[in-house]
Amino acid sequence: MTVRRIFTLVGAALAGTVNATDEAVPPADPREVRALLAELGLIRPGAFEAELPQALRRFQARAGLAVDGIAGPRTTQALARSAREARHLRSLGMAA
């Protein structure tokens, strides 16, 4: 995932938390959410669409977020942050 794609995803999530209620925020790009979940090892790269909500619920539970299986602003922001941290740990030679 490129830095630009991460900034786009995080920017959309931040804009939603600052400028709108959760109901008015457009859903996150499923491809980006899938890529972040795969990067974190919560879903396999070729997983079916039906597997995404369960993977999101697992992530949300681990991250202390509301567990609803929806990639809202807080979830996408936390996903992007977790993926960035995992990449950093891997670059240091540590398991993520």
Image (tube, rainbow, N blue to C red):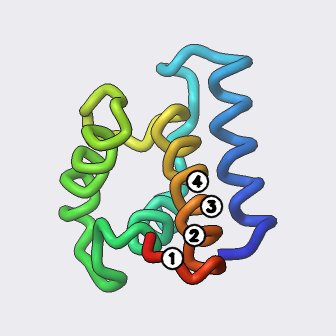
Is residue 53 positioned above or below 62 on the image? below
Question: Closer to us: mark 4 or mark 3?
Answer: 3
Q: Earlier in the sequence, mark 3 or mark 1?
A: 3
Q: Which residue is mark 1?
A: 94
> Do the residues bearing badges 3 and 1 touch, measured as CB atoms within 8 Å?
no
Residue in the picture at 31% in, 85% down: 46
Instruction: Tell me whether the residue at label 4 lies in contact with that at label 3, contact meaning CB atoms closer than 8 angstroms.
Output: yes
Left or right side of 49 for 6: right
SS for tag 4?
A: helix
Q: Residue 5: image x %, image y %?
A: 72, 65
Q: Quadrant of the C terminus?
A: bottom left
> Along the line of sight, which residue is nearer the eye, 26 or 37?
37
Residue 47 appears left or right of 20 = left
Horizontal arrangement in the rendering, residue 54 relative to residue 20 (left or right)? left
Label pair 2/1, CB-CB below 8 angstroms: yes
Q: Which residue is mark 3?
A: 84
| Residue 89, disc | 2
- Mark 4 closeness class: few <14, some 14–19, many ≥20 residues within 10 Å: many
Check disc 3 and give the amino acid type: Arg
Classify mark 1: helix, strand or loop. Answer: loop
Quadrant assignment for the N terminus? bottom right
